[in-house]
Amino acid sequence: MIALLDYKAGNLTSVRKALAAVGADVLTPDTPEDLARASAVIMPGVGHFGATSALDRRWIDAILDGVSRAKPLLGICLGLHFLFEGSEEAPEVPGLGLLSGRCVRLRPPEDAGLKVPHVGWNSLDIIRRDTIVDGIETDTQVYFTHSYVAPLTPDTVAATTHGERFAAVVQRGHVSGAQFHPEKSGEAGLQVLRNFLSQVR
Amino acid sequence: MLSKRIIACLDVRDGRVVKGVNFEGLRSAGDPAVLAKRYNEEGIDELVILDITATLEKRQAMANTIRAVARELFIPLAVGGGIRTEADAEAAIEAGADKVSVNTAALQKPELITRLAQRYGSQAVVVAIDAKLQNDRFAVYVRSGQTETGRDAVEWAREAESRGAGEILLTSIDRDGTKAGFDCPLTAAVSRAVSIPVIASGGAGGLHDFVDVFTRGASDAALAASIFHYSETSVSSLKSYLKTHGIPVRMTSPAC
């Protein structure tokens, strides 16, 4: 059973539908205690980093408890940002701190004529091989919609460039994240979800 | 590099895809779910379902059509037409839309843009602007192109962005359904005035029209309906053409 966190930022229909398409059983936990029943956790996310403050200490402790028990955790978009220490978007709100670094606003060079938010299909540059990108090749295009980005660190698995390079996919052990939306990225996105599910024991 | 998006629009009335010329004289083009599946296989980047008669007939967004289209689709899906309230938006999003497109209601109640952006995120809020050239400026029309609003398209696009819109879907009423090419001056004027993506719509006829709107029109995405519906142009041949003309596009493997 995969727990899909609903913290009232955006809609989960698309993620739920994509998870069903790759054969996952999904529950949306009502209380932090429900997380104990899940074998993996997905933190979806759209919108503002401040929205993560809807997850109070009890939720965060329950998520971290799952991670300490080696349950796979996947953060999508804002959910990826939440894996880090925090974000410039809401500096007063701490992240989970599972990965080192802070998220910052995407700032392409002004003369590049590039728009922010970064919306649309862009290509992945696979930096290192890890479970989450099994079967995904460099130049595969996936769908992004965001204004803030996670830094390139040793946890970066794939990078994408929009004026500047940023982390598109991260993984550290059983903790992983996608800046793009796997549920909206066609076959490549479904493959990432399958890769995540393959980690679930 | 970020690809230029090719978006197929399904203008739906009574559960069937139709496409008119200058918003009038509709003719039937088929089942929305069948067309959506075909476009997805051909490598379309995004789909828009537009309930074209909803504004006139005060119809709610068609949840069943959305559900049928969204069922096997894992690319972005936007729904517009008749989204007048938060409840309308909620119904469309619950049925499987990733984005809602607001037009008339946004002009009448601009705070709707902000409320939707706060609830679903800006990425879920598209403001559709229907414009035509009038006395050297681009005038905004509503109610399927029947009513002038007195607003200027560039100024309204800027306001929509500041109120939380995530994208602008810009339709040229002069070009819609004519196949005379996109309105590049209109598109460029709006696209250069905002930092959110602008989707050009209205007038797609030949392959080179898309090259024009991505270069001279400075658009981030281009939307078309009839040229895809009647198989005059396949999505994959359009993308190959764009690629050979130096436009970055998402290439997908041909369906086996």
Image (tube, coloured by chain):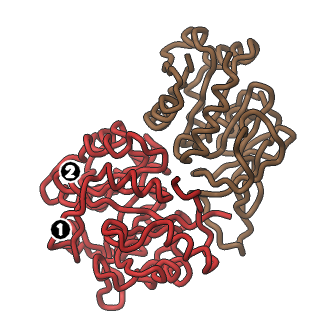
Query: Furthest residue to the left?
Result: B57
Q: Chain of mark 2?
A: B
Q: Amino acid at mark 2?
A: Gly
On the image, the x and y values in percent for residue B175 come to: 32, 81
Q: Most extreme residue toward the front, as rendered?
A: B256
User: Do we see residue B135 in this rendering?
Assistant: yes
> In the rendered structure, are the residues bearing label 2 and label 1 in contact, judged by CB atoms less than 8 Å apart?
no
Chain identifier, brown in the render: A
Query: Is B216 rendered above or below residue A127?
Result: below
Q: Quadrant of the N terminus of chain B?
A: bottom right
Q: Amino acid at mark 1?
A: Arg
The image position of residue A74, as x and y in percent, is 66, 30
Dot 1 lies on which element? strand
Residue B15, numbered circle: 2
Residue marked by disc 1: B27
Indicate the chain coloured red by its letter.
Answer: B
**Disc marking residue B216:** none
State left or right for residue A108 relative to residue A2: right
What residue lies at 27% left-to-right and 61% top-to-bottom? B11
Q: CA distance from mark 2 to mark 1?
A: 13 Å
Kindly identify the residue that appears in the image at 28 percent across and 40 percent down: B87
Q: Are marks 2 and 1 on the same chain?
A: yes
Mark positioned earlier in the residue sequence (2 or 1): 2
Q: Chain of mark 1?
A: B
The residue positioned 38% from the left and 72% from the top of the image is B201
Please say whether residue B188 is visible from this viewpoint: no
Q: Nearer the viewer, residue A102 or B42?
A: B42
- Label 2 packing within 10 angstroms: few (<14), some (14-19), many (20+): some
